[in-house]
């Protein structure tokens, strides 16, 4: 990796951090920040069931991300109740994906794709 590539990647990561911080700040005052509806409420309810010891629900659970409730349960177990730890951890994972995507695109398609 050249110094220029490293600088561009660093700028992309910094931009990702800034955008995620601004987003978290912006949504923190929203009515639905802690009051979930729809699929998010279902996932969180399933996570609470997992924390209560019900690893397999008594009914069919047809959702596209079957392991996401386990992720939510782990985050709640480690960091406590509330959605702020989940949102912050997801922002960190999102920022961490920037260099990963850069490396994968660069290896599979080429330098230009990695930088785009």
Image (cartoon, rainbow, N blue to C red):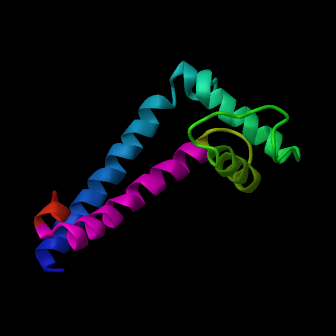
- Outermost residue, right side: 53
Question: Residue at position x 46%, y 49% from top?
Answer: 91
The x and y percentages for residue 67 are 64, 49
Closer-to-camera residue (66/90): 66
The x and y percentages for residue 33 are 56, 28
Instruction: Give the quarter of the figure containing the C terminus.
Output: bottom left
Tell me: 24 left or right of 80.
Answer: left
Closer-to-camera residue (91/68): 68
Q: Which residues are magenta?
A: 85-111
Chief SS of the magenta region: helix
The x and y percentages for residue 92 are 47, 55
In the figure, residue 99 lies in which quadrant? bottom left
Question: Residue at position x 15%, y 72% from top?
Answer: 5
The x and y percentages for residue 39 are 60, 27
Question: Residue at position x 51%, y 49% from top?
Answer: 90
Q: Residue 108: within the magenta?
A: yes
Tell me: 53 left or right of 87.
Answer: right
Q: Quick check: 49 above or below 36?
A: below
Instruction: Give the quarter of the figure containing the N terminus.
Output: bottom left
Tell me: 17 left or right of 9.
Answer: right
Closer-to-camera residue (5/22): 5
In the figure, residue 107 lies in which quadrant? bottom left
Q: Quick check: 29 above or below 22?
A: above
Q: Residue 49: within the magenta?
A: no
């Amino acid at each position: 990796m050249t110094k220029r590539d490293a600088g561009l990647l660093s700028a992309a990561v910094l931009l990702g951090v800034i955008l995620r911080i601004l987003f978290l700040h912006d949504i923190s005052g929203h009515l639905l920040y802690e009051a979930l509806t729809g699929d998010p409420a279902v996932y969180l309810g399933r996570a609470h069931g997992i924390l209560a010891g019900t690893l397999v629900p008594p009914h069919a659970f047809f959702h596209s991300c079957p392991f996401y409730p386990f992720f939510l349960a782990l985050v709640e177990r480690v960091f406590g109740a509330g959605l702020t730890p989940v949102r912050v951890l997801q922002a960190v994972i999102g920022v961490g994906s920037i260099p990963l995507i850069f490396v994968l695109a660069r290896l599979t398609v080429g330098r230009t794709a990695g930088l785009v």
